[in-house]
C-alpha cells in the first residue's frame, strides 16, 4: 500500500517523477543494506523473535509517515522500513521453501506468491476506495502489520539452528546460482518500477487517480489468481524453460502499454504481464529450494533479498528517469529491456550449461 500511497501523495504535491523514484528507492536500499546481516542476526536472536521485532518496527514506521509528514523525513523512514521488510521476506521465504517437499514445492511457493500478491493488490485497491487524504490509510496499514504478528508467534523453531561454515557464506553463494540471481534482479527492477510508478504513469497518460491505482491492482491480479498453474507446471517441467517463456511474454505485454493505456485492452494486458512478470520470482524461489537446504537456503534467501534490494533500488531510479525523458514510452521501454535481456540470457546460458547449472 505504501508504494502507490506515497507516490500519489507526492504526485499531488507536484514532486517530479525522478524524485518520486528516488524516494521509492529508499525502501529497496534498506533491503540491500540489511539483508546480508539477517543470517547472523537470526542465529543470535532466533528466527521467530527476529520476525516479531521486524514486524513491530515496520508497523511503527508506517504510522510515522503521517507523524513526520515531509519529503526529507520520508527518505529516512523508507530506508528503515526497507530494513524491517527485508527481515520478514528472508525469514518467511526460508520457512515456506524449507518446510515444503520437493514434489510439491512449486505449488507451495505459488500459493505463497499468490497470498503475498493478494496483499500487494489489496493495498492499491484500498487506496482507490479511500483515497490518499488523512490518517486512514496509514492507520489501516499499521493495523494490518500488527495483526501479522499473531501467526508469527505460533511458529515453532528448532532448538539448534544450523551453523554457518565457509562453504555456506553469503559471498560464496553468489557464483553458485548466477541465473537465479539474474532472474531475481530482473524481477526486482520490474517490481519496484511498477509498484512505485505505474499509478503515476497512468495519471500522466490520462487516467484518473483511482483508475491508475486499480491499474496496479490489475497487474497484481494475475499473480494472485494464476500463480498456482505456474507452480504446478514448475513441478513437472524444466524451470529454466519456464523462466524464459515468462520473461519473453512479459516483455511482449509491456511493449503494448503505450497503445492500450487508454482503452479496455489495458486490463488483460496488465493481468497477463503480472502473471508472467511475477512468475519469474516464483520459479526462481522454487528452484532455490530444489537446489539448497539448511544454512545454504538461509544464505540463498538473504542473497535474493540483497539482489532484490539492488534491483529495486535501480528499478525505481531508472523508471523515474525514463518517465522524465518520455511520459508515454519511457516506463514500458524500460520494462521491455529488463525482461528481454533476461530471456536472452537464459537462452544463451542453456546453450552453454546443463539445465541444473
Image (cartoon, helix red, strand yellow):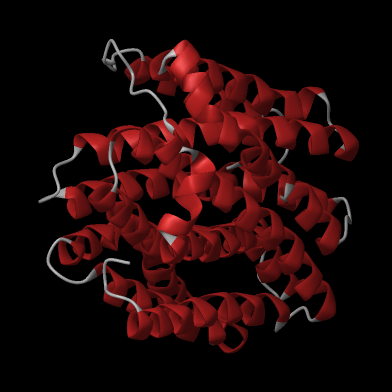
Q: Residue visible at 27% across and 52% down?
A: 291
Rendered location of residue 40, percent (x, y): 51, 24
Note whether 313 is above or below 251 in the view shown.
Answer: above
Left or right of residue 107: residue 190: right
Position of the C terminus, as image quadrant, is: bottom left
- Taking the view exactly as shown, the residue that stands out farthest to the front is 166
Rendered location of residue 161, percent (x, y): 33, 18
> Within the image, what quadrant is residue 223 found in?
bottom left
Note whether 258 is above or below 302 in the view shown.
Answer: below
Left or right of residue 317: residue 214: left
Position of the N terminus, as image quadrant, is: top right
Rendered location of residue 337, percent (x, y): 59, 81
Q: Residue visible at 73% across and 52% down?
A: 8
Residue 267 visible from this viewpoint: yes
Q: Residue visible at 83% across and 26% down?
A: 68
> Within the image, what quadrant is residue 179 found in?
bottom left
Residue 263 visible from this viewpoint: no
Amino acid at each position: 500500500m505504501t508504494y502507490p500511497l506515497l507516490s500519489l501523495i507526492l504526485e499531488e504535491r507536484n514532486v517530479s517523477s525522478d524524485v518520486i523514484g528516488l524516494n521509492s528507492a529508499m525502501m529497496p536500499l534498506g533491503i540491500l543494506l540489511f539483508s546480508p546481516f539477517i543470517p547472523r542476526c537470526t542465529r543470535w536472536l532466533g528466527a521467530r523473535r527476529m520476525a516479531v521485532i521486524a514486524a513491530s518496527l515496520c508497523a511503527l514506521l508506517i504510522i510515522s509517515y503521517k507523524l513526520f509528514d515531509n519529503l526529507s523525513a520520508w527518505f529516512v523512514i523508507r530506508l528503515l522500513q526497507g530494513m524491517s521488510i527485508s527481515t520478514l521476506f528472508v525469514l518467511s521465504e526460508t520457512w515456506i521453501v524449507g518446510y515444503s517437499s520437493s514434489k510439491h514445492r512449486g505449488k507451495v511457493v505459488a500459493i505463497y506468491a499468490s497470498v503475498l500478491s493478494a496483499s500487494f493488490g489489496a493495498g492499491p485497491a484500498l487506496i482507490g476506495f479511500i483515497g490518499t487524504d488523512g490518517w486512514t490509510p496509514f492507520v489501516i496499514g499499521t493495523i494490518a502489520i500488527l495483526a501479522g504478528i499473531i501467526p508469527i508467534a505460533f511458529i515453532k523453531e528448532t532448538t539448534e539452528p544450523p551453523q554457518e561454515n565457509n562453504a555456506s557464506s553469503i559471498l560464496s553463494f553468489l557464483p553458485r546460482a548466477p541465473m537465479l540471481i539474474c532472474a531475481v534482479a530482473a524481477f526486482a527492477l520490474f517490481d519496484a518500477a511498477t509498484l512505485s510508478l505505474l499509478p503515476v504513469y497512468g495519471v500522466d497518460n490520462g487516467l484518473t487517480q483511482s483508475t491508475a491505482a486499480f491499474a496496479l491492482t490489475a497487474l497484481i491480479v494475475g499473480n494472485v489468481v494464476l500463480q498456482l498453474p505456474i507452480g504446478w507446471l514448475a513441478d513437472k517441467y524444466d524451470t529454466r524453460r519456464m523462466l524464459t517463456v515468462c520473461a519473453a511474454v512479459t516483455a511482449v505485454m509491456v511493449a503494448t502499454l503505450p497503445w492500450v493505456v487508454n482503452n479496455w485492452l489495458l486490463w488483460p494486458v496488465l493481468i497477463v504481464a503480472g502473471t508472467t512478470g511475477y512468475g519469474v520470482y516464483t520459479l526462481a524461489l522454487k528452484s532455490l529450494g530444489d537446489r539448497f537446504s539448511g544454512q545454504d537456503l538461509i544464505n540463498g534467501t538473504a542473497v535474493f533479498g540483497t539482489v532484490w534490494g539492488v534491483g529495486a533500488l535501480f528499478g525505481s531510479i531508472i523508471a523515474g528517469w525514463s518517465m522524465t525523458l518520455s511520459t508515454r514510452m519511457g516506463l514500458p521501454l524500460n520494462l521491455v529491456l529488463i525482461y528481454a535481456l533476461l530471456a536472452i540470457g537464459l537462452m544463451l546460458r542453456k546453450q552453454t550449461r546443463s539445465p541444473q547449472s
